[in-house]
Amino acid sequence: MSKQAVDNDCHMDEDSNILICVKDLAVAYQTNVAVFDINLDVYRHDFLGICGPNGSGKSTLLKSLVGAVKPFQGNIRLFNKDALKSEIREIQNRISYLPQIETIDRNFPALVKDVVGMGLYAQKGFFRGLSKEDNQRIFDSLETVGMTNLSERPIGHLSGGQQQKVKIARALVNKPEILLIDEPFSALDFKIAKEIAELLAKIYKETEITIVLVSHNLAIIREYCNRAVCMDRRIIWEGKPQSKDFDEAVQRVFHF
C-alpha cells in the first residue's frame, strides 16, 4: 500500500484546549487496513472512553498517538505540534502510555519502587542515577495509587490488581499531561476492575490530567467518562456515554 501525502487539516491555536487532533487517519498492517477515516479531537481534561469489538482498531489508534505505528494517511497533532514530524522524545515527556495488561513472572526480581522509577528514564536516560527529587516523585506516585506500603516488594509477588496500580504509578511518575491507557480491566475481576476505575476517576478529578481509556467495560465508560467513542475500524459514534444514543451505538457496533 503506497503512502500518501495528506495536507495538515488540524488547525489548532496555541491557546486551544485541543490537546490531540487526529485528521483523516488510516493505519495498515501490510495490506490489512486496521483503521481508516479517523477524525477525533481530545480536549484538555477530557476523560474519553473508546469502545468497540475485538479487531476494531482501538489499540492501533492509541499506538499511533505515541508513534508506535505509523499511518499511511492522515495527520496527528499533539500539543499543537505535528506528531509525525516532531521529536518523539519531546512528545513522550508529556504523554504516558499504558498498554494492555501483561502477566509478570513471579520470579521477576524488580522491586515495586524500581518499576515505578523506570518511568523516569524517558526524561533522564538509562545511565543516570536517581536523585532525591526523583525518589520523592516515585514515593508520590505510589502514594497516589495507595501502594507505598509495598514499595519494597518484588513486583512479581503482587496480585494482578496491585500490579496494575504500580503500572499506573509508573505512568504518572513523569507527571504527564495525557494518560493513554489500553484495556486496564481485561484480566481483573469485577470488584478489582471497579477499584481501578475509581482510582482513575480520583486521579482525573484531583489533577489536570487528560485520560484516554480503551475498554470493553461499557459500564465503566458509562459511569466515569465524560465523552465516549464507539469504533469499528472507524469512528461510528461520538458523544456522551450517559446518553441513550450511546446505548444504541453500542448495540450497533457490537451487534447486540
Image (spheres, rainbow, N blue to C red):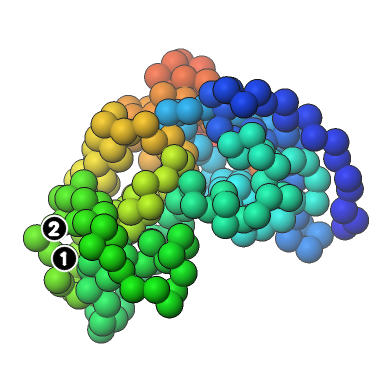
177 to 18, vertically: above or below: below
Residue at left offset 53%, top offset 53%: 92
Residue 76 horizontal/vertical position (percent): 69, 41
Q: Nearer the viewer, residue 158 or 91?
A: 91
Mark 2 residue type: Thr
Give left or right: position of 104 versus 58: left
Q: Nearer the viewer, residue 87 or 61?
A: 87
78 to 164, vertically: above or below: above
Q: CA distance from mark 2 to mark 1?
A: 5 Å
Q: Are marks 2 and 1 in contact (CB under 8 Å)?
A: yes
In this view of the protein, can residue 96 be seen by the observer?
yes
Quadrant where the image shows the N terminus: bottom right
Q: Nearer the viewer, residue 98 or 208?
A: 208
Q: Residues within 10 Å of mark 1 (few under 14, many from 20)?
A: some
Q: Nearer the viewer, residue 133 or 34?
A: 133
Q: Residues within 10 Å of mark 2 (few under 14, many from 20)?
A: some
Circle 1 — which element? loop
Circle 2 — which element? helix
Q: Which mark is residue 148?
A: 2
Residue 21 horizontal/vertical position (percent): 64, 33
Residue 71 horizontal/vertical position (percent): 74, 51
Residue 238 horizontal/vertical position (percent): 57, 24
Extreme-top residue of the structure: 244
Mark 1 residue type: Ser
Give left or right: position of 69 versus 73: left
Residue at left offset 17%, top offset 50%: 143
Q: Which mark is residue 151?
A: 1
Residue at left offset 68%, top offset 50%: 86
In this view of the protein, can residue 252 be seen by the observer?
no
